[in-house]
């Protein structure tokens, strides 16, 4: 799997995780650098675009992403 195309501009990492570098690194390894198709943020982005990705959506909140997509 390729590195996520949004990694350098992901608002989650640039805003929400700026003060938690250890946690941010773990999320990046698991989602951005390994399997971005599992990332809840990437899933919503692919469905609706960047504007519809909630700023507080964590990469591991796949169930929440599915609800967002189902709600349209």
Image (cartoon, rainbow, N blue to C red):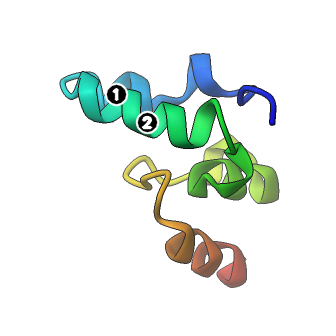
Disc 2 to disc 1: CB gap under 8 Å: yes
Q: Position of residue 16 (x, y in %)?
A: 31, 35
Q: Which secondary structure lies at badge 2? A: helix
Most extreme residue toward the top is 8
The image quadrant that residue 26 belongs to is top left
Q: Which mark is residue 15?
A: 1
Q: CA distance from mark 2 to mark 1?
A: 5 Å
- Identify the residue at image location x=61%, y=34%: 32
Q: Quadrant of the N terminus?
A: top right
Residue ID at (50%, 51%):
59
Rendered image: mark on residue 12: 2
Crowding at label 1, few (<14), some or many (≥20) Cα neighbours within 10 Å?
few
Q: Is residue 31 above or below residue 4?
A: below
Q: Residue at x 26, y 27 (%)?
A: 22
Left or right of 20 in this view: 65: right
- Residue 5 pos. (x, y %): 75, 26
Give the image location of residue 24, x and y in percent.
35, 31
| Quadrant of the snapshot with the C terminus | bottom right
Asked whether, in this view, residue 9 is left or right of residue 61, the answer is right
Q: Is residue 37 above or below residue 20?
A: below
- Apparent side of residue 58 relative to residue 42 in the rendered image (left or right): left
User: Which corner quadrant of the image does residue 15 belong to?
Assistant: top left
């Amino acid at each position: 799997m390729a590195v996520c195309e949004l990694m350098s501009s992901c608002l989650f990492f640039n805003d929400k995780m700026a003060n938690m570098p250890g946690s941010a690194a773990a999320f990046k390894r698991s989602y951005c650098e390994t399997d971005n198709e599992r990332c809840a943020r990437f899933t919503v982005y692919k469905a609706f675009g960047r504007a519809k990705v909630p700023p507080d959506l964590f990469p591991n909140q796949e169930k929440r992403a599915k609800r967002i997509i189902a709600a349209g």
